[in-house]
């Protein structure tokens, strides 16, 4: 199956926002080779976990469906806020390959069967993003500002002549449409992430679509 950008995405993503009293250390979850200047920023009180059901094209002729769960840590660098996807668990090999080439640290892992992709147990994580029936405790459609931060990625590969990338990248998209936002009440607020028990402060689900065009170099300065 070919992978050629741009790729069109249609997603239903459910997110939990965490805001802990004591910082959580995500450094052990990051991919090998991430520079120390970024690694040292991956100790955070506030972070987001999103699990999504996704349909996307990989070329003009091909498309895939997959489930993925992303652990997202906000980082402030060079006067700008970013989301760094520390680790992504995905159940489709084409999504894994595409993500690696873009700079995601993707790991092949399938969610628990019969849970609509909302339960994942792997390594230092035990996640359950199922919701209680009925309205959430908050009625506003406002979502955390982190949801709008651009993705900061790190690449370091040289496969064959002409297929290589090294450095920080910024994910690029266009034609973004947010179709709906729903507040939800988590059935299990307590989660285990990075071998720590943490508590979800908010859960929401977004249906959206966009076109992924690729990535561009990110101009970030060490220790900024």
Image (cartoon, grey):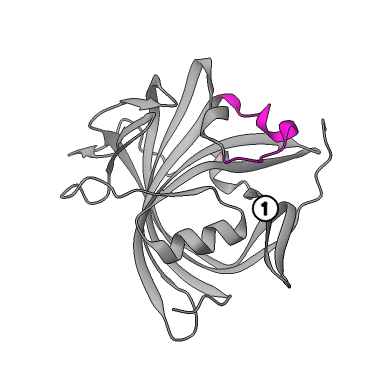
Please give the name of the residue rendered at 37% of the width and 32% of the height, measured from the top-left corner. Answer: 123
Location of residue 64 (image quadrant):
bottom left
Location of residue 80 (image quadrant):
top right
For the image, the number of numbered tags is: 1
> Is 105 rendered above or below residue 9?
above
> Is 156 rendered above or below residue 81?
below
Whether residue 39 appears in magenta in the rendering, the answer is yes
Q: Residue furthest front?
A: 160
Q: Which residues are magenta?
A: 31-44
Q: Quadrant of the N terminus?
A: bottom left
Front residue of 86 and 176: 86
Judged left or right of residue 112, residue 149 is right
Give residue 170's position: percent from left, percent from top. Answer: 69, 55
Residue at the spot of label 1 = 155
Front residue of 72 and 159: 159
The answer to whether one can see residue 142 in this image is no
Please give the name of the residue rendered at 39% of the width and 61% of the height, measured from the top-left corner. Answer: 11
> Is 6 rendered above or below residue 54?
below
The answer to whether one can see residue 101 in this image is yes
Q: Quadrant of the C terminus?
A: top right
Location of residue 124 (image quadrant):
top left
Determine whether the residue tagged by mark 1 lies in a helix, strand or loop: strand
Please give the name of the residue rendered at 71% of the width and 54% of the height, measured from the top-left corner. Answer: 169
Give residue 32's position: percent from left, percent from top. Answer: 60, 40
Judged left or right of residue 209, residue 53 is left
Question: How packed is label 1: few (under 14 Cα within 10 Å), some, or many (20 or more)?
Answer: some
Whether residue 191 appears in magenta in the rendering, the answer is no
Give residue 150's position: percent from left, percent from top. Answer: 64, 50
Judged left or right of residue 193, residue 36 is right
Front residue of 77 and 207: 77
Give residue 186's position: percent from left, percent from top. Answer: 28, 33
Please give the name of the residue rendered at 48% of the width and 75% of the height, measured from the top-left corner. Answer: 58
């Amino acid at each position: 199956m070919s992978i050629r950008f741009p790729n069109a995405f249609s997603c239903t993503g459910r997110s939990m926002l965490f805001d802990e009293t004591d910082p959580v250390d995500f450094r052990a979850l990051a991919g090998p080779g991430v520079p120390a200047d970024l690694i040292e920023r991956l100790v955070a009180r506030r972070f987001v976990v999103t699990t999504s059901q996704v349909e996307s094209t990989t070329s003009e002729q091909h498309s895939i469906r997959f489930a993925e769960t992303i652990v997202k840590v906000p980082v402030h660098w060079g006067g700008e806020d970013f989301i760094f996807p520390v680790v992504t668990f995905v159940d489709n090999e084409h999504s894994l390959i595409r993500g690696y080439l873009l700079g995601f640290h993707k790991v092949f892992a399938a969610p628990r069967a019969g849970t609509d992709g909302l339960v994942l147990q792997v390594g230092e994580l035990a996640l359950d993003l199922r919701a209680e029936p009925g309205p959430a405790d908050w009625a506003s459609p406002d979502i955390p500002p982190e949801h709008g931060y651009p993705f900061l990625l790190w690449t370091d590969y040289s496969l064959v002549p002409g297929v290589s990338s090294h450095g920080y990248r910024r994910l690029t998209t266009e034609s973004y449409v947010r179709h709906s936002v729903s507040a939800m009440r988590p059935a299990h607020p307590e989660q285990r992430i990075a071998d720590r028990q943490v508590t979800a402060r908010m859960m929401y689900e977004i249906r959206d679509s966009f076109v992924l065009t690729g990535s561009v170099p990110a101009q970030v300065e060490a220790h900024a």
